[in-house]
Amino acid sequence: MEYILQPWPWYVSGPCIAVVMFLLLYFGRTFGMSSNLRTMCAIGGAGKRVAFFNFDWKSQKWNLIVVLGAIFGGFIAHYVLSNPINMDLSEATVTDLTALGFNDVGKNLLPPELFSWDAVFSIKGLSILIIGGFLVGFGTRYAGGCTSGHAITGLSSLQLPSLIAVIGFFFGGLIMIHLIFPILF
């Protein structure tokens, strides 16, 4: 018997996110992955050269648990909770992805054309990682936070700059997937 892989329903994942946000707000904390990267850079001594990283990183040690949780949770999700089964994709999606050069569409959550070691260590893969990393770092600093920080913490605390940033993230994502992605692949 073949099962169809589906994401967790909103009524499971949504309340889990809400509980975490209520706890963070109760304890006066904010959530965002980019702040973890800033903390790791400060731990590594980047504050000696760049003022942005010169802060009391010890007050943010708790936030590094988020990084460990993301790594450990991703490992569990991939190796324990994922079933190696086909995904139920629309024919239009399969046709579009096949036209972009993806083989066996719907057979893997992470297509090997993007996520295999051969793809990562190619000139194209390394270029995308380096340029993408720079753009994400620049955008995060320019926007004053990352997508998770603005979309989860900022919107839940009703901050207008976060709403503007999230709208920008969505428009940027639409431009990327419809205009830039087809050129790259």
Image (tube, rainbow, N blue to C red):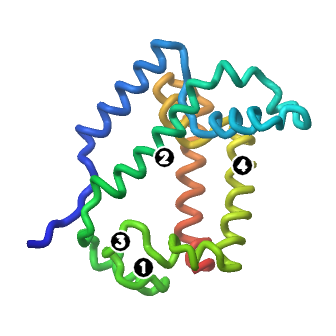
Q: Amino acid at mark 3?
A: Asn
Q: Quadrant of residue 147?
A: top right
Verify CB contact (< 8 Å) between mark 2 and mark 4.
Answer: no
Q: CA distance from mark 3 to mark 4?
A: 29 Å
- Residue 23 percent coordinates (x, y): 42, 19
Which of the marked residues, 2 or 4, is nearer the chain's N terminus?
Answer: 2
Q: Nearer the viewer, mark 1 or mark 4?
A: 4
Quadrant occupied by the C terminus? bottom right
Q: Seen in the image, is 22 located left or right of residue 61?
A: left
Q: Amino acid at mark 4?
A: Gly
- Residue 19 percent coordinates (x, y): 35, 25
Q: Secondary structure at mark 1?
A: helix
Q: Nearer the viewer, mark 1 or mark 2?
A: 2
Q: Residue at x 63, y 36 (%)?
A: 36
- Residue 20 percent coordinates (x, y): 40, 26
Q: Residue at x 29, y 31 (%)?
A: 15
Q: Amino acid at mark 1?
A: Leu
Q: Residue 137, which numbered label?
A: 4
Which of the marked residues, 1 or 4, is nearer the chain's N terminus?
Answer: 1
Q: Nearer the viewer, mark 2 or mark 4?
A: 2
**Residue at mark 3:** 108
Q: Residue 97, which numbered label?
A: 1
**Residue at mark 2:** 71
Q: Secondary structure at mark 2?
A: helix
